[in-house]
Amino acid sequence: MSKQPPLTISGEPRAFFGRRAGKTLRGRQQGLIDTLLPRLAIVLPEHGELDPRALFASCPAEIVLEIGFGGGEHLARKASENPETGYIGAEVFANGIGKMLERIDADGLANIRLFTDDALKLLQALPDGALAGVHLIYPDPWPKTRHHKRRFVSPMTLAELVRTIRPGGFFRFATDIEDYAVWTLAHVLRSKGLCWQHGVPGSWHRPYPDWQPTRYEEKARAEGRLQSWYFTFLRL
């Protein structure tokens, strides 16, 4: 796998995210960014497609992508529970990347690779049907109307998800913001290639069967946002 230089916190923000850094990284996190990240970071090819299975020594049969993994607790847990599956985490926020690297190092997770730029670039580089599934868990809702264009869910990104998720694969989306839930559902229902697994009325408020709350979710509950939406869409 090609290597890239350690993560730098510079450059203009892309369409789907804002800042790249918050608090100053702790010494251990910065050390892992300097030493571990170059071994795990995905570098897109200048020409042609990226073979995601070739990123892993085990050449896993299934690849799952998590877009915006935050502190990494969901991604790390899924990778630990499914060591035979290759996981790709896409995140631009330096503090989240640092936390993810700590989890990978502490738990010895060999089935995770990281992409530290706009996830759309990664999707566009993948072959058709390359992914078994995609997680988009509590993405930034960009609540102001003028910022809605920054939301990750859009006709363009859904078209890439449909192209890159294999038939029978999944797209999981979770949010605690009702407006973003409605926005996502409306966009998916207008798209071609994804089917909503809706169940009985209200079932979309029940967490996924294998769900464990993230730190973000616990914080949202403490702040009074008591309801979430958990959508599962299947690739037709």
Image (cartoon, helix red, strand yellow):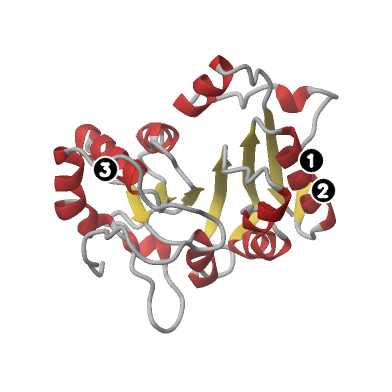
Marks 1/2 in contact by CB < 8 Å: the verdict is: yes
Residue type at numbered disc 2: Ala
Tell me: 31 left or right of 216. Answer: left
Residue 163 in picture, x, y percent from top left: 64, 65
In the rendering, at what x and y percent does residue 42 appear? 34, 63
On the rendered image, what quadrant is the N terminus found in? bottom left
Task: Give me the disc on residue 186.
Answer: 2
How far, Cα to Cα, is label 1 from label 2? 6 Å
Look at 79% across and 60% down and name the residue there.
192
Q: Quadrant of residue 166?
A: bottom right
Q: Residue at x 35, y 43 (%)?
A: 22
Residue position for label 1: 182
* Three-letter code, disc 3: Leu
Q: CA distance from mark 1 to mark 3?
A: 34 Å
Q: Which of 196 and 81 lies nearest the eye of the viewer?
A: 196
- The answer to whether residue 38 is above or below residue 174 is below
Q: Horizontal placement of 106 versus 18: left or right?
A: left
> Circle 3 — which element?
helix
Q: Split into 4 quadrants, where in the image is the C terminus? A: bottom right
The correct choice, above or below, for 87 with respect to 109 in the image is below
Find out whether the residues at labels 1 and 3 contact each other: C-beta distance under 8 Å.
no
Q: Relative to 48, does residue 53 appear above or below in the rendering?
A: above
Q: In the depicted view, which residue is nearer to us: 126 or 226?
A: 226
Secondary structure under the numbered disc 1 in the rendered image: helix
Number of residues whose C-alpha sits closer than 10 Å to that of mark 2, classed few (under 14), some (14–19) or many (20 or more): few
Residue located 70% across and 58% down the image: 154
When asked about the image quadrant of residue 220, the answer is top right
What's under tag 1, amino acid-wise? Val
Few, some or many residues within 10 Å of mark 1 (<14, 14–19, 20+): few
Q: Which residue is mark 3?
A: 101
